[in-house]
Image: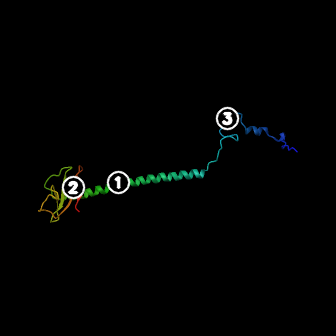
């Protein structure tokens, strides 16, 4: 017993409609048109957007952290400058019998009467006679006429 296929009714085929679904030059169309052609998958737009949002958050968090680190560094620099100004004001109020030179090291002491004294002599160079109550710090005059603390009393 041989089985024959289903007969095709040629009168029901719309040749005009079928011609719209085919092309004379199939190599020029931008999508696969045969079973062996490249597979096209629809994109998962949710996944694409999710990855993009995740990457965006990662990048912006990194940039915010970088700015925060820069702000912290600037705040530390401001604190250092403020400390230099405070020390500088104290030194300029102290008694000094010489003109300090930029880049040279000097020593700040507190006298018995509570006033400050700027000296060329270091705390270990005085010997037995010390004309001060306590050593405060060794300082260096900077070009902007502020003072940098090199060593503080313990």
Q: Is residue 107 found left or right of 79 in the rendered image?
A: left
For label 2, count other residues whose C-alpha is less than 10 Å away and answer few (under 14), some (14-19) or many (20+).
many
- Cα separation between marks 1 and 3: 64 Å
Q: What element does badge 1 sit on?
A: helix
Q: Is residue 109 found left or right of 4 in the rendered image?
A: left
Label 2 belongs to which residue? 139
Residue farthest left in this picture: 129
Residue 93 position by quadrant: bottom left
Residue at the spot 35% in from the left edge and 54% down from the top edge: 73
Question: What mark, if any, has residue 27 been given in the picture?
Answer: 3
Question: What mark, if any, has residue 74 been given in the picture?
Answer: 1
State the count of labels.
Answer: 3
Which numbered mark, 1 or 2, is in the foreground of this view? 2
Answer with mark 1 or mark 3, whichever residue precedes in sequence: 3
Answer with mark 1 or mark 2, whichever residue precedes in sequence: 1
Q: What element does badge 3 sit on?
A: helix
Residue 19 position by quadrant: top right
- Residue 84 location in percent, x, y? 26, 56
Residue at the spot 37% in from the left edge and 56% down from the top edge: 72
Q: Of 81 and 26, which appears nearest the observer?
A: 26
């Amino acid at each position: 017993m041989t089985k024959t296929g289903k007969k095709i009714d040629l009168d029901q085929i719309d040749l005009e409609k079928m011609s719209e679904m085919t092309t004379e030059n199939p190599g020029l169309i931008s999508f696969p048109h045969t079973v062996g052609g490249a597979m096209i998958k629809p994109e998962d737009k949710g996944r694409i957007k999710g990855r993009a949002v995740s990457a965006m958050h990662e990048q912006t968090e990194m940039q915010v952290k970088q700015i925060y680190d820069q702000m912290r560094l600037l705040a530390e620099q401001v604190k250092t400058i403020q400390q230099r100004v405070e020390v500088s004001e104290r030194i300029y109020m102290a008694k000094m019998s010489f003109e300090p030179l930029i880049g040279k090291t000097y020593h700040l002491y507190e006298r018995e009467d509570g006033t400050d004294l700027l000296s060329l002599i270091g705390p270990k160079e005085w010997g037995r006679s010390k004309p001060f109550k306590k050593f405060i710090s060794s300082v260096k005059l900077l070009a902007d006429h502020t003072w940098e603390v090199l060593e503080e009393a313990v």
